[in-house]
Amino acid sequence: QVTLRESGPALVKPTQTLTLTCTCSGFSLSTSGMCVSWIRQPPGKALEWLARIDWDDDKYYSTSLKTRLTISKDTSKNQVVLAMTNMDPVDTATYYCARIPPTYLPSHAFDIWGQGTMVTVSS
Amino acid sequence: DIQMTQSPSTLSASVGDRVTITCRASQSISSWLAWYQQKPGLAPKLLIYKASILESGVPSRFSGSGSGTEFTLTISSLQPDAFATYYCQQYNSYPYTFGQGTKLEIK
């Protein structure tokens, strides 16, 4: 069974760095063509794509957030990590990780999503 | 960045109705478009990719069409579990962008 599970702090203070982990099961991040993205959704608002990392370690970032984001992966743990610096209350959102399967390429649709983790930014 | 605009923002319909949601891109995205369904408190679920390919397990009453800058999601006969919010997403170029969502409500 293919699953993704997000984990990280539920509450961070303004200016702090947020670190989120996406633990993947049922597939390998090392599989050729495999990609994982992070997407967020502020309460009551639309989805916003943040970053993507590929099996070959290529990385892509949101234009508006690229200076604050770092995506990485640990293939030995089958995990993808997202770091976001200088957190602000407007970054309060549910953060999702989602998979792009190699069988869908060149389509970059997200076939499996994690359940999401809610992060609140407040002092 | 490519802007994705959905219409309407809210749609009221009844069980059995046929409904259509439109998504427009600010520039051509060929057929590189996906549709997702999201229910309250849950993650989005992929319905359609490459504009018209139905994801495995998704009922055939869902269909997608379009290319270039204009796309539609059609539900041929609304069932109770279809009342949710729908998002389009372009993946023609980075950054990926989503529409603002269309909330499908029970009339």
Image: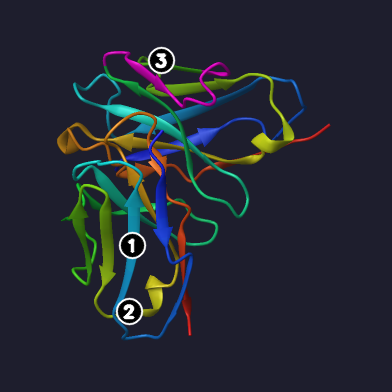
Q: Which residue occupies the foreground of this view, B8 or A46?
A: B8
Cα distance between the residues tagged 1 and 2:
17 Å
Question: At numbered mark 3, what does the secondary structure look like: helix, strand or loop?
Answer: strand
Q: Residue at x 27, y 80 (%)?
A: B77
Residue flagged by tag 2: what amino acid is it?
Leu
Q: Position of residue A11 (x, y in %)?
A: 72, 34
Q: Residue at x 24, y 77 (%)?
A: B76
Residue flagged by tag 3: what amino acid is it?
Asp
Q: Measured along the vertical axis of the image, is residue B70 above or below residue A47?
A: below
Q: Residue at x 63, y 50 (%)?
A: A43
| Chain of the residue under label 2 | B
Residue marked by disc 1: B22
Residue marked by disc 2: B78
Q: Nearer the viewer, mark 2 or mark 3?
A: 2
User: Are the residues under marks 2 and 3 on the same chain?
Assistant: no
Q: Which residue occupies the foreground of this view, A5 or B58?
A: B58
Apparent side of residue B105 relative to residue B21 in the rendered image (left or right)? right
Residue flagged by tag 1: what amino acid is it?
Thr
Q: Measured along the vertical axis of the image, is residue A30 above or below residue B30?
A: above
Magenta extent: A56-69
The disc, 1 or 2, on the residue closer to the chain's N-terminal end is 1
Residue marked by disc 3: A74
Task: Determine which quarter of the picture holds residue A27.
Answer: top left
How packed mark 1 is, by other alpha carbons closer than 10 Å (few <14, some 14-19, many 20 or more), is: some
Task: Determine which quarter of the picture holds residue A103.
Answer: top left
Kindly indicate whether the residue at mark 2 contacts the one at mark 1 (C-beta within 8 angstroms). no
